[in-house]
Amino acid sequence: MVSIRIFIFCLVTSLCCTAQDPVSDAEQARHEKQFTQYQHSTKTFTAAVRQILHLSGMKKPVVSLGRIYFQNPQGWLLIRYSKPAEEFILLRDGKLYLQKKDKPLKIQSLNRENSFAMMRRFFQEDAQSWKKDFDIAMFEDEKNLIISLTPKRKEKTLPLVIQTRVNRQTFLPQQIHLVFEGENEIIYEFTQPQRNATLPSQLFAPPDAS
């Protein structure tokens, strides 16, 4: 099992980092400091999102479109989908609200290892917080910084690796890629990002479960 994880990690890393250069320790420390400053000054984030879900056995991935909203310091995260319409995911106050089209609303306690909670950590936490749970490696190309997070604990519920692509100048995210055991993966691609835009408070209001 360990050898399979190592193989998958090496494969994903090699694919991600083709034609990209690893940063030096000094550069990584500088990037971590800059990113921490960015995180601490970010109050809101919103962007168009394209979600690509690939599960083992699927003939083709499932692609969903929508918009993501995040607000600090509360740590609220909302993905409202336009395709499929009428669906959304809300993370708020320790709960996960999941609405599927023509299905009852699901409300459950939020597990820190849930894939959406893992993604939220990118928006909510700084580099020092990441280091408690992840080994961090960084690569760069002409415009982007690629951050590879490998969980220190090896469990089936955790991704094998989380790879995030951000703009080197603005640190605005362009992609978050979670790779799980068994060739399962989720990719979030962000376009038209906005940082610290005013978001209405009612946007994150918990839905009526009745």
Image (cartoon, rainbow, N blue to C red):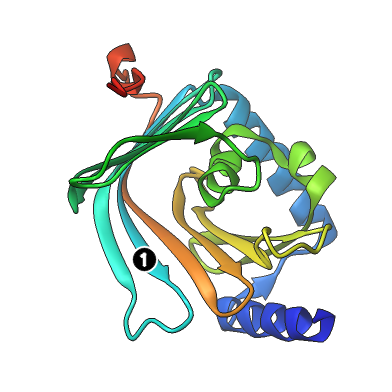
As rendered, which of 24 and 126 lies closer to the eye? Answer: 126
Q: Split into 4 quadrants, where in the image is the N terminus?
A: bottom right
Which residue does the image show at 74% across and 78% down from the upper left? 5
Looking at the image, residue 196 lies above or below residue 6: above
Q: Quadrant of residue 54?
A: bottom left
State left or right for residue 92 relative to residue 202. right
How crowded pointer 1 is (Cα within 10 Å; few <14, some 14-19, many 20+) is rated as some
Residue 89, picture quadrant: top left
Q: Height in image: 104 above or below 163?
A: above
The local secondary structure at tag 1 comes to: strand
Q: Residue at 73% across / 42% down in the picture?
A: 127
**Image x and y of residue 51, in percent:** 35, 59
Q: Amino acid at mark 1?
A: Ile
Which of the two residues, 159 or 190, is positioned nearer the viewer here? 159
Quadrant into which the C terminus falls: top left
- The residue carrying mark 1 is 52
The percent position of residue 179, horizontal first and vertical second, equals 58, 69
**Residue at the image point whose x is 68% and y is 34% from the top:** 36
The furthest residue to the top: 201
Task: Give percent across and percent down for residue 169.
Answer: 51, 47
Up/down of 93 relative to 178, above or below: above
| Position of residue 90 in the picture relative to residue 74 (left or right) | left
User: In which quarter of the view is residue 158 placed?
Assistant: bottom right
Residue 87 position in % (x across, y down): 24, 43
Would you place residue 17 above or below residue 65 in this image? below
